Amino acid sequence: MRRRDLIALAVGAAVATPLGARAQQKAVPVIGFLGTSPSAPVEAANLAGFRQGLGDTGYIEGQNATIEYRWVESHYDRLPELTADLVARKVDLIVAQSDPTARGAKNATSTIPIVFFMGGDPVRQGLVVSLARPGGNLTGVTIFGNELDPKRLELLSELVPQAKMMALLVNSSNPAVPIERIPAPLEEAARTKGVRLRMLEAGGESKIDAAFATLAELQVGGLIVTTDSLFGNRVEQLVALAARHAVPVIYYRRDFVDAGGLISYGPSFAAAFRQVGAYAGKILKGEKLADLPVQQPTKFSLIVNLKAAKAIGLTIPETFLVRADEVIE
């Protein structure tokens, strides 16, 4: 081979190698995951659902996709720092696991796609223009968690029809939760059932204990635990307090009942996270975010724990049990 040909070959190799390396690096997308708490057992099921959704679109963590995890752990003041870090790392997509993290991600970037899982109304919170056509750089799944509270109140009232006072346990430290007043639909449901409502604020572990301590003083006949990651990360604590104070409690997720709680009514979180994972994968594959409407669950399950009912001296009517999707003996 002539010397001129050798030089041309060497130059071509020097140019091609960096380009090839960059192309190969770009082929492995990086997902930023803004989560609530890595220690809660429920996260294992949620992350399994998310990874399953990614897998449905052909992405496997550690093989052809990388996930950078950032955990808020209910310290919402850390959100600007955590989101700024993900943006600085130039992740290809951000998954936001809650209402506050979705807003934090939106405040941090208008260009990186964001797929959220949230309990509230993304339209009312100004995250999307509409559910059908989100607009901007956000879409995802909302379970409209606390909008199911009127139904939960109705179910709880069936179990304790003699109750004249019901309470809501709310996280006063969550910026997405309005605690100034009880939502109008819930007030209307309470009037229909002839009960008064009281909001119990809990912004941390010790405040949860204090809130339960006031139940007897207020003569509360039943308690609704509202949808919030703070409570989701303290399943054992809440179930233990409900048993200690012998108060009927309805929860928003079935793992509370699996841990010994009385009843739950709500959607499957794992199924919702699978949809989040599927949306993330579709966007990484090039689908337009604007063509992906905000999803909502269509199935809601009522789970009843008879052992928990017996422990607090509560008899659950047979007519109630036949409507349950699952009864834990």
Image (spheres, rainbow, N blue to C red):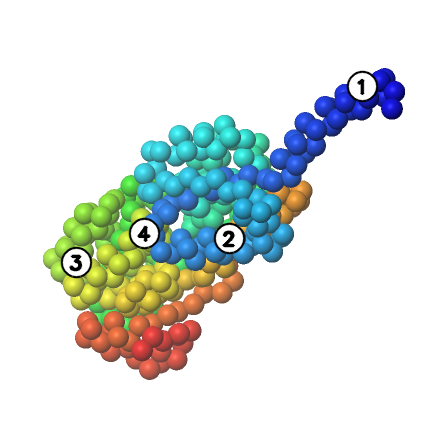
Q: How far apart are marks 3 and 1 (CA)?
A: 84 Å
**On the rendered structure, is 180 left or right of 143?**
left
Q: Find residue 233 and name its label.
A: 4
At horizontal 29% and vertical 57% (from top left) the residue drawn is 235
Image coordinates for residue 267, horizontal then vertical, percent: 44, 61
Residue at the location (33% across, 33% down)? 77
For the residues bearing labels 1 and 2, Cβ distance under 8 angstroms: no
Residue that carries the numbered disc 1 in the rendered image: 7
Residue under numbered circle 3: 215
Asked whether the beta carbons under mark 4 and mark 1 sit within 8 Å of each other, the answer is no
Mark 4–mark 1 Cα distance, whole angstroms, equals: 63 Å
The amino acid on which the numbered mark 3 sits, given as a three-letter code, is Leu
What secondary structure is marked by label 2?
helix
Placement of 284 over or under 109, stated as above or below: below
What's the CA distance linking mark 2 and mark 4?
18 Å
Q: What element carries label 4?
A: loop
Front tag of 3 and 4: 4
Q: Residue furthest front?
A: 1
Nearer mark to the viewer, of 3 and 2: 2
Separation of marks 3 and 4 at Cα, in angstroms: 22 Å
Quadrant in which the C terminus appears: bottom left
Mark 3 or mark 4, earlier in chain:
3
Q: Is any atom of residue 275 visible in this view? A: no
Q: What residue type is labelled 4?
A: Asn
For residue 224, above or below residue 180: below
Mark found first going from the N terminus, 1 or 2: 1
Amino acid type at image mark 1: Ile
